[in-house]
Amino acid sequence: MDIERQVQETFSNHYKSVVLIRRGSDGIGTGFIIGKTRKSYVAMTCYHVISGNPSGALKVRLPRDTKDYVAELLYEHQGYDLAIIKVNGVSGECPILQFGDLEGVAHRANVVQLGYILGSQFALNLDPSVSPGSVIRPANQNGMMGSQDVVYSAAARHGASGSAVMFDDKVIGVLYSMSTNSQVAYARSSTTVHMALKNWLHPNDAAITTEKMIELVVKPLNDSELDD
């Protein structure tokens, strides 16, 4: 598949899964849906997108929607620069994005970055942006707590942190840093996401999958909503 068609299909299939996160009066970033309860959605983003947030000031907007939904922090890890939030009271349909492994992700493989790129914190984008990219290093060892990065070339500016980096219709990375001069971007790999989930949940099964751990995140939220 050529890259232009890949970008178009990624946007068409997944733009409803990407959210704009607003922290306080000036913080802004991206998240994407990884789980759903009866009354809310669960989204992954970067720690630095939600850190330093005043109580009650974490808001989320859905694509093509100007309503602010209240969100709350579920898990955070500064070292991995990853976090999970719960978005409350969403009535629209937001499909869940699935994580994929790095098998088959080679040097120069085409990827698509799906997230919000804003010219300024005051800009209002109703849709996320899609940016084609090319993998530079598919599994770069970062050295931070054994974390692993996907290094790729793509356009990434204000608001893009927390974007989903997609390969073969699945998320292989979470954008957390970029070099604006060289257009080199760094994403925490799906392997690092798996490590972070293990750190948060401490599952008994050493071979547990990322999908099963996300189910463990969602289950108690569903149970608590039944009690409301």
Image (cartoon, rainbow, N blue to C red):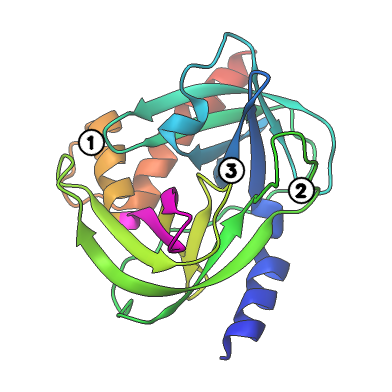
Q: Tell me the residue at 29%/56% (across/down).
A: 149
Marks 2/3: CA distance?
Answer: 11 Å
Quarter of the figure with the N terminus:
bottom right
Does residue 144 appear to the left or right of 85 in the view shown? left
Percent across and percent down for residue 56 are: 63, 11
State whether residue 83 is above or below residue 7.
Answer: above
- Label 2, secondary structure: give it: loop
- Whether residue 188 appears in magenta in the rendering, the answer is yes
The circle drawn on residue 170 is: none
The residue indicated by pointer 2 is 63
Marks 2/1: CA distance?
Answer: 34 Å
User: For residue 65, what is the image quadrant?
Assistant: top right
- How many neighbours does mark 3 have within 10 angstroms: few (below 14), some (14-19), or many (20 or more)? many
The residue indicated by pointer 3 is 30
Residue type indicated by callout 1? Pro
- How many neighbours does mark 2 have within 10 angstroms: few (below 14), some (14-19), or many (20 or more)? some
Q: Does label 3 or label 1 sit earlier along the sequence?
A: 3
Residue range (magenta): 175-190
State whether residue 40 is above or below residue 9.
Answer: above
Q: Tell me the residue at 36%/47% (across/down).
A: 212
Does residue 189 appear to the left or right of 23 in the view shown? left
The residue indicated by pointer 1 is 203
Closer-to-camera residue (86/106)? 106
Magenta span main SS: strand
State whether residue 150 is above or below residue 76.
Answer: below
- Label 1, secondary structure: give it: loop
Are the residues flagged by discs 2 and 3 in contact, CB closer than 8 Å?
no
Residue type indicated by callout 3? Thr
Percent across and percent down for residue 197 are: 31, 39
- Label 3, secondary structure: give it: strand
